[in-house]
Amino acid sequence: MVIILHHKPRNKKGLFTNGEIIINNQDVSKLTEKQRAKIRLKQIGLILQSSNLVPFLKVKDQLNLLDKVNQTNISKDEFNTQVKELGLSSVMNQFP
């Protein structure tokens, strides 16, 4: 598991102004938004940002929805392990 927190200056649109992001030897910064979305879904798996959340679903339901969309079908034990590793146990029943 890799968690990346990035705080760098952004331009007026809120986008990072420099640098590159390499995932599996591919420069993601040069891909289209549709291609980046596919990589986020299939290779990164989870990005918790307000723009990606369904406002009427609790955190646990957001994660279950992502599992269904991605068709990963992880077990309940694996789900609970990942929730604990990410430190999300205390917010699972909260709304975004």
Image (cartoon, helix red, strand yellow):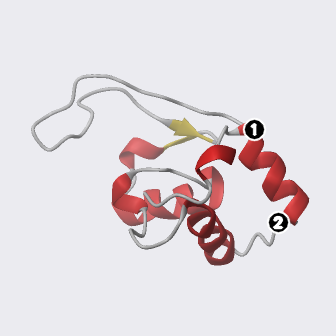
Tell me which amino acid carries mark 1.
Answer: Glu
Quarter of the view holding residue 63: bottom right
Look at 86% across and 64% down and name the residue there: 76
Residue at the disc numbered 1: 85
Q: Is residue 42 above or below residue 61?
A: above
Seen from the viewer's position, the closer of residues 49 and 2 is 49
User: How many marks overall?
Assistant: 2
Badge 2 element: loop
Seen from the viewer's position, the closer of residues 43 and 1 is 1
Q: Position of residue 67 (x, y in %)?
A: 68, 69
Look at 39% across and 42% down and name the residue there: 29
Q: Is residue 48 left or right of residue 72?
A: left
Can you say which quadrant of the picture contains the C terminus? Answer: bottom left
Q: CA distance from mark 2 to mark 1?
A: 15 Å
Residue at the disc numbered 2: 74
Tell me which amino acid carries mark 2.
Answer: Ile
Look at 9% across and 38% down and name the residue there: 12
Chain-order first, disc 2 or disc 1: 2
Q: Position of residue 38 (x, y in %)?
A: 52, 64
Seen from the viewer's position, the closer of residues 9 and 77 is 77
Q: Is residue 72 left or right of residue 63?
A: right
Q: Is residue 50 above or below residue 11?
A: below
